[in-house]
Image: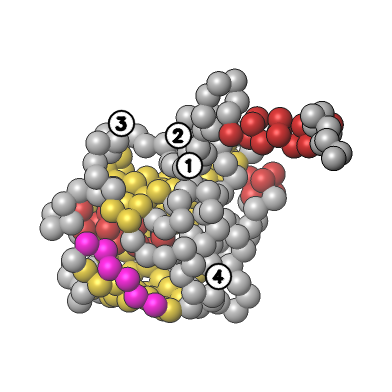
Amino acid sequence: MRHLSPLIPASALLILLLAGCASVRDGRPPVERREQRMAQASSVAGVAEESFGKPAWGAKGEFALGSQRVRYERGADRLALFEPLPAAVRTPLRFNVGDSAAVCEGWTPEQSANARQSSSKPWVLSCRWGSAPAAMLQIGEGQLRQGKLSREGAYRRGELTLGLRSAHLHEGNAQPQTVAVGYEMLHQGTVVGSLDLSGPVPRLRRPDPATPVGRAVTEAALALALVSDAAAGR
């Protein structure tokens, strides 16, 4: 009877070695890839997150945010403040939260020196809410930092004003992203809300939505989320 050779072919030995390296490296189990998240200001770091919406908004749809239903219609299947406004779209967004309805217009201003330096074509988003007292949001080109052009603006309802600015840093990463990983909402110079767009769906941190500041953060965040199909972390 012929006996099998006790020697393992070199090719088989190499396969076994590679398999061992894939499962154990330097005696440690494989490290799972950490989900990217927007870097948070300390003033909202401890605020609970609320996920909402879906990965791709499309032209129309609805979703829940807390106990409220949100319905929206957009002027194009794809919209993003960090991409050119689609041709012929002048009303990029309409949405309702309960009995509060917003109509948003969009336009592309003359290209500035900052936009030319960043190879960007920023457009302006302007939204109005008719429920008393009437509210308005406007956001467009912001500051050029490290070659990245931000988007900045404000939301106003009566005497209440929120500052709006895009955020470009992930947690633990000092390199800014070209497009927004999220947005921050500021009241009297302090970040009071944030919209994290780095994951598969938006994540919101906000004050109590029953308060005037919480309502303002909610309405601003919804408008910004619905024109943010090009989130950096997706």
Mark before the other along the chain sequence, 4 or 1: 1
The residue at the point 25 percent across, 36 percent down is: 46
Query: Do tag 2 and tag 1 residues touch (Cβ < 8 Å)?
Result: yes
Front disc: 1 or 3: 1
What amino acid type is highlighted by mark number 1?
Gln
Q: Which residue is drawn at 63% across and 34% down?
A: 22
Q: What residue is drawn where x is 28% and y is 48%? A: 49
Residue at mark 3 to residue at mark 2: CA–CA distance: 12 Å
Q: Identity of the amino acid at label 4?
A: Arg
Name which residue type carries label 3. Answer: Ser
Magenta-colored span: 61-66
Label 2 crowd bin: few (<14), some (14–19), many (20+), radius 10 Å: few
User: Closer to the camera, 35 or 139?
Assistant: 35
The CA distance from mark 2 to mark 4 is: 27 Å
Q: Name the residue under label 1.
A: 36
What residue is pinned by disc 2? 171
Residue drawn at (34%, 46%) of the image: 194
- Marks 4 and 1, how far apart in space? 23 Å
Secondary structure beneath label 3? loop
CA gap, disc 4 and disc 3:
33 Å
> Magenta segment: does it hold 38?
no
Name the main secondary structure of what is drawn in magenta: strand
Question: Which numbered disc flags the more N-terminal residue, 1 or 3?
Answer: 1
- Mark number for residue 42? 3
Q: Which mark is residue 141?
A: none
Q: Is mark 2 on a helix, strand or loop?
A: loop
